[in-house]
Amino acid sequence: MTTYASLNPYWRQYFAQHEAQGLSLEEVLGDINQLNLKEPGEIDLALCLQMPKLRFIRIWAPGPVVGIENIPLIPQLRELIIGSDSFTQEHLPLIAASPLLNNLVIIQIPFDDLDALNDSPRIKSLSLVVTALAPEAIARLTKITTLRISKPGSADGLGGFGLSHRI
C-alpha cells in the first residue's frame, strides 16, 4: 500500500493538503479524475496507475517526467495535454496506445512526425501548438477528424488554436 511518506517529493507536495486533512492516500487517489501537473520537480507517472477514475492529465511541469511508459496503462484516460520537454518522438507510440484516449494536445514539443498517432485506437482530436511542422507530417494523419494548429504565445495560454479544421 502506498503511503504519503513513500511518495517522491513532487507527489508529497501535490497531496500535502489532503494529508493535512487526514484523508488516506488510497481514498484520495481513488477520487482523482484529473491532474494538472505544473510545478517543478520529478513527476513519476507510475502513481497514476493507482487512480482508477483518472480521465484527464495536463503535464506542463518544468522538470523530468518519468514513467511515461505507464500512460497507455491508465485505464480511463480520455484527454492528455503534454507540454514538457521530457516527452520525445519515441513516446508517441506509447501515447497512441492508450485505449480510450481521444483528445491529445501537444504544446511546443519538437516532434518530426506524428505518424504513430495513426495507430491509436481512439485519438480523433489533435491540437498542436508548434513553431514549425512539415505539411506532409500533417497530411499523413489519416485518422484525426479534428485538428487545431496554432503558434506559441497566443492569448489563451494554450496557443489560441487559431487555425482549426474539422476533417
Image (cartoon, rainbow, N blue to C red):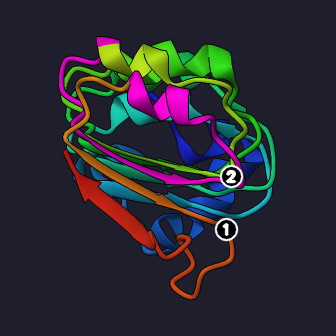
In the rendered view of the protein, which quadrant contains the N terminus? top left
Could you say which disc has been placed on residue 33 in the image? none
Question: Could you tell me which residue is drawn at 45 percent across and 73 percent down?
Answer: 162
Count of number-bearing discs: 2
Task: Identify residue type, mark 2.
Answer: Gln
Task: Identify residue type, mark 1.
Answer: Pro
Q: Position of residue 39 (x, y in %)?
A: 71, 64
Query: Where does label 2 land, which residue?
Result: 108
Can you say whether 140 is above or below 125 in the image? above
For disc 2, the neighbor class at 10 Å (few under 14, some 14 to 19, many from 20) is: some
Mark 2 and mark 1: Cα distance apart in space:
7 Å
Secondary structure type for disc 2: loop
In the rendered view of the protein, which quadrant contains the C terminus? top left
Q: Which stretch did the figure color magenta?
A: 119-140
Query: Where does label 1 land, which residue?
Result: 152
User: In the shown orientation, is residue 78 left or right of residue 72?
Assistant: left
- Classify residue 116 by image quadrant: top left
Q: Position of residue 158 (x, y in %)?
A: 53, 70
